[in-house]
Image (cartoon, grey):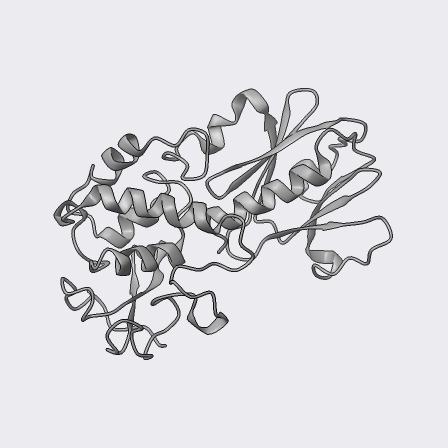
């Protein structure tokens, strides 16, 4: 699933391609929008909000999309071949004279009044890469349920908007804390907020995410996706297990030596 830095970067690319230009093509291929035609309206801007994309168009309208696990927006020049997937996976086409933005496999696509954007993003916590970033409010929300496991609290977009499963695992490692540690027992919760902000800011312009001191392809992450491999810091094999409610489970990775608070997770380890 794309995380806040990826969505921020995508929003910038969409904004650069579409903003301040009238739409010469509009094709929204979901049942509830099948009769909607935005042709002739100028795109005012594309804004990221956590993992959400808000494309604002002339006339007080916003096209709201969310990528979730495998959605994507691709941008093409007029004569360029579309390579984002088969035609039946296309959910949206927004074209100007110079660029065409094509949305593939979008699980969320809806049109609403710009004045009503809070209906779809108002529940989110402070956006780590947004103009509303408020570390004090983020900390308050993170600690509001002190018994909640740290990994779950970090992943909850109502606390901090923009952290996905990769950053959750990497943050827990850098904090030397178990993903199952009750968030209220975190020795320095302010550092969790500061570090989350630092990581996303450092990666928002990078094509490949890096959380270690090395940008080498095989050494960019500390623990994520490395179950069974030696910890880059101490050599202990990295463990993995599912974490979170059944409907929101994510595979969590951690080092049992570098994150000494780690106890046995509530369910068996996930397959590497």
Query: From what the image shows, is residue 217 above or below residue 36?
Result: below
Can you give x and y, in whole percent of width and height, for residue 267 in the image?
23, 68
In the depicted structure, whether residue 23 falls above or below residue 162: above
| Left or right relative to 67: residue 211 | left
Q: Is the C terminus in the top left, top right, bottom left or bottom right quadrant? A: bottom left
Q: Residue furthest right?
A: 79
Q: On screen, 90 above or below 37?
A: below
Can you name the residue that lies furthest to the front here? 213
Q: Is residue 195 left or right of residue 143?
A: right
The percent position of residue 156, horizontal first and vertical second, equals 33, 45
Q: Relative to 228, say whether 17 is above or below.
A: above
Across the whole image, how many numbered discs are drawn on residues?
0
Q: Return the x and y of residue 127 as percentages of the image width and height.
A: 41, 36
Which residue does the image show at 47% across and 51% down from the upper left? 203
Q: From the viewer's side, name the closer residue of 216 and 41.
A: 216
Residue 263: give x, y in percent of width and height.
14, 66
Residue drawn at 25 percent across, 37 percent down: 139
Instruction: Residue at 47%, 28% (x, y): give it.
Output: 119
Q: Residue 179 occupies which quadrant of the picture? A: bottom left
Residue 129, picture quadrant: top left
- Residue 45, picture quadrant: top right
């Amino acid at each position: 699933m794309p995380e806040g830095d990826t969505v921020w970067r995508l929003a910038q690319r969409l904004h650069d391609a579409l903003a301040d230009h009238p739409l010469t093509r509009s094709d929204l291929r979901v049942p509830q929008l099948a009769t909607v035609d935005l042709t002739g309206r100028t795109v005012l801007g594309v804004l990221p909000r956590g993992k959400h994309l808000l494309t604002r168009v002339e006339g007080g309208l916003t096209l709201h999309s969310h990528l979730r696990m495998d959605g994507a927006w691709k941008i093409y020049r007029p004569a360029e071949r579309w390579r984002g997937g088969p035609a039946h996976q296309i959910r949206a086409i927004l074209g100007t004279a110079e660029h065409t933005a094509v949305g593939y496999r979008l699980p969320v696509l809806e049109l609403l009044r710009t004045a009503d954007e809070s209906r779809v993003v108002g529940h989110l916590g402070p956006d780590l890469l947004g103009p509303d970033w408020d570390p004090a409010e983020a900390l308050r929300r993170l600690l509001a349920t002190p018994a909640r496991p740290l990994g779950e609290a970090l992943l909850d977009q109502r606390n901090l908007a923009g952290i996905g499963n990769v950053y959750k695992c990497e943050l827990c490692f850098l904090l030397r804390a178990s993903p199952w540690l009750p968030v209220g027992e975190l020795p320095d919760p302010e550092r969790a907020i500061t570090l989350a902000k630092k990581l996303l800011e450092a990666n928002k312009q990078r094509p490949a995410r890096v959380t270690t001191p090395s940008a080498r392809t095989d050494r960019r992450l500390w623990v994520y996706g490395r179950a069974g491999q030696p910890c880059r810091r101490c050599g202990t094999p990295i463990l993995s297990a599912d974490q979170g409610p059944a409907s929101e489970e994510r595979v969590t990775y951690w080092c049992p030596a570098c994150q000494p608070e780690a106890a046995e997770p509530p369910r068996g380890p996930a397959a590497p």
